Image (cartoon, helix red, strand yellow):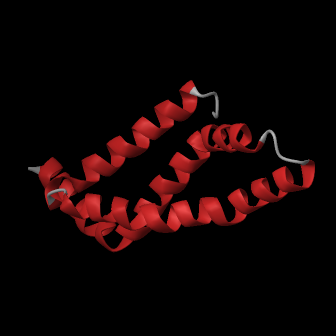
Amino acid sequence: MFILDLNLRLAHFIQPHLQDISLALVATCLVVYGDKVNGILKRWVSSWVFIARVSAFILMCTFGYGLLTLWSQPLVYWGITRIDFVYRPAFVFLCFCILGILAERKRHL
């Protein structure tokens, strides 16, 4: 009974912070997989002249990652809100654990 009560309290506690939690999940994914995105961009622009390559990289870092964050955060938020209220704390904890494991495997930790 104590664990169920603690879980419900935690679910109520994280409820107003779900948008921030979803933003943190998206930002962490972009940090972990940003090198893949940069690698794809590098392959696309490798034949361009130096100024164009630098400009493409600057645009990707300033606008590309920002747009990825802005567009994917509401989707993650929507997905979290579709999880039953009782299971949300465990789901959020599991998501951050999985991202931590993925970061460790990519040598980001």
**Residue 21 placement (x, y as % from top left):** 42, 61
Query: In this image, 79 relative to 71: left or right?
Result: left
* Foreground pick, 4 / 17: 17
* Foreground pick, 83 / 60: 60
**Residue 13 placement (x, y as % from top left):** 30, 67
Residue at 46 percent of width and 39 percent of height: 99
Placement of the C terminus among the 4 image quadrants: top right
Residue 40 image-quadrant placement: top right
**Residue 101 placement (x, y as % from top left):** 47, 31
Residue that sits furthest to the left in the current view:
1
Query: In this image, 18 relative to 40: left or right?
Result: left
* 83 in relation to 48, above or below: below
Residue at 66 percent of width and 66 percent of height: 63
* Foreground pick, 109 / 7: 109
Query: In this image, 77 relative to 7: left or right?
Result: right
Residue at 55 percent of width and 34 percent of height: 103
* Foreground pick, 94 / 7: 94
Query: In this image, 56 relative to 14: left or right?
Result: right
**Residue 90 placement (x, y as % from top left):** 26, 47
Residue 60 image-quadrant placement: bottom right
